[in-house]
Image (spheres, rainbow, N blue to C red):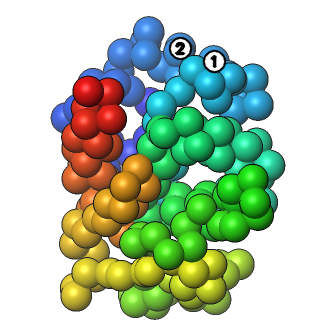
Amino acid sequence: MSVSENILDEVTRKHYEDEGFMNKLNSSLKLGELNPEDYKVIYFAGGHGTMWDFPDSSEIQNMSKTIYENGGILSAICHGVGALLKIKYKNGELVINGKEVTGYSNTEEELANAMNKIPFQLEEELKKAGAKYTKALNPFVSYTKVDGTIITGQNPQSTEEVAEKVLDVLNMIEK
């Protein structure tokens, strides 16, 4: 196992030790190989690397737009919220314009000593895109926003809450 033992919780450790799960994970399809019509949810994980990879990906934009326009859920956590920055409706309007969202905050970037290492400040770019950005009063605590079928979490501490809200909204739209 290449992941440091001390950062894995019990559930994650079980997955890393499950050879069948790891084989599926290591042979997963690329986004461009999937049919967006087959999905009701897309969930973007975070990490600083996503700030370079997600915002300008046409595959992410196309997949997300189709899922969303079909009544599905766009969800993201932490820096993964950057995937939502450039998704547009057919009329060219940004999907997050006017939507309540959250994502990794400037305060958290400063506390992580990452301000000079990132290509842009997610909090500022979300605001520039017309999103109604809010964040928790205190950094590094769980904070989520749900605006229709757009579900976002501020930081890694929000992961479980975002997943629960995705399931709640999915159950609602499937009724």
Distance (Cα) linking label 1 and label 2: 6 Å
Q: Dot 2, how many residues are within 10 Å of its Cα: few (below 14), some (14-19), or many (20+)?
A: few
Q: Count how many numbered circles sit on residues in the image.
A: 2
Q: Label 2 belongs to which residue?
A: 23
Question: What residue is shown at x 27% (from left), y 75% (from top)?
Answer: 140
Specify the quadrant that holds the C terminus: top left
Is 175 or 158 nearer to us in this picture?
175
Please report contact status of discs 1 and 2: CB closer than 8 Å, yes or no.
yes
Q: Disc number at residue 27?
A: 1
Q: Amino acid at mark 1?
A: Ser
Q: Residue 145 at x, y = what percent?
A: 31, 65
Q: Residue 60 at x, y = what percent?
A: 69, 46
Residue 117 at least partly seen = no
Residue 165, relative to residue 37: is it above or below? below
Q: Secondary structure at mark 1?
A: loop
Specify the quadrant that holds the N terminus: top left
Question: What residue is shown at x 71% (from left), y 78% (from top)?
Answer: 119
Q: Residue 97 sits in which quadrant?
A: bottom right
Question: What residue is shown at x 68% (from left), y 23% (from top)?
Answer: 35
